[in-house]
Image (spheres, grey):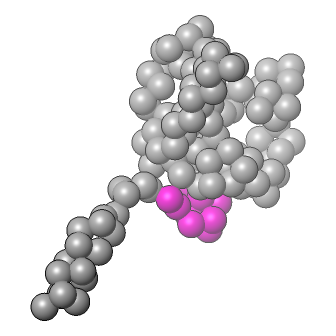
Amino acid sequence: MKASVVLSLIGCLVVPSGAAIMGRCKVAKKLYEGGLDYFEGYSLANWVCLAYFESKFNPTAIYENSPGGYTGYGLFQIRSHDWCDRGKNRCHMSCSALLNPDLKKTIECAKRIVKGKDGMGAW
């Protein structure tokens, strides 16, 4: 009896987080399909590495950087104060659009960012 109660409680505690962590190959495929392979001279490996280190392949990641005064959104942790509607909105989109696992808006914005003078150094 005690064991079943304990197992029931553990079962209630182990609830899926709903995080949309993507596999490395799936991320690579979506980035390739989005035209990022050698976009502005950066290889697909560069983009996959960026995605891993920024969000651990979580396209719905949100990170608030209080000292920096911005919030990072999505797979590439695109900064709100410059690139989406909570700031200068240079990508002309809502920050929430950067959280879509289809990655279309994320890729569109990443292309705009990397075309800038800092290239991938903008991250």
What's the magenta region? 21-31
Left or right: 58 in relation to 55 = left
Left or right: 23 in relation to 36 = left
Residue 16, position as x, y percentages in the image: 34, 63
Residue name at image x 64 percent, y 40 percent: 76
Q: In which quarter of the image is residue 106?
A: top right
Q: In which quarter of the image is residue 10?
A: bottom left
Left or right: 72 in relation to 86 = right
Tell me if residue 84 comes above or below residue 75 in the rendering. above
Image quadrant containing the N terminus: bottom left
Residue 114, position as x, y percentages in the image: 76, 30
Image quadrant containing the C terminus: top right
- Can residue 21 be seen in this snapshot? yes
Residue name at image x 52 percent, y 43 percent: 61
Q: Which residue lies furthest to the front in this view?
A: 2
Left or right: 115 in relation to 91 = right
Residue name at image x 48 percent, y 15 percent: 85
**Within the magenta stretch, is there residue 102?**
no
Looking at the image, which is closer to me, 53 or 6? 6
Tell me if residue 96 comes above or below residue 61 in the rendering. above
Looking at the image, which is closer to me, 10 or 48? 10
Residue name at image x 64 percent, y 60 percent: 28
**Within the magenta stretch, is there residue 26?**
yes
Residue 110, position as x, y percentages in the image: 66, 33
Main SS class of the magenta portion in the image: helix
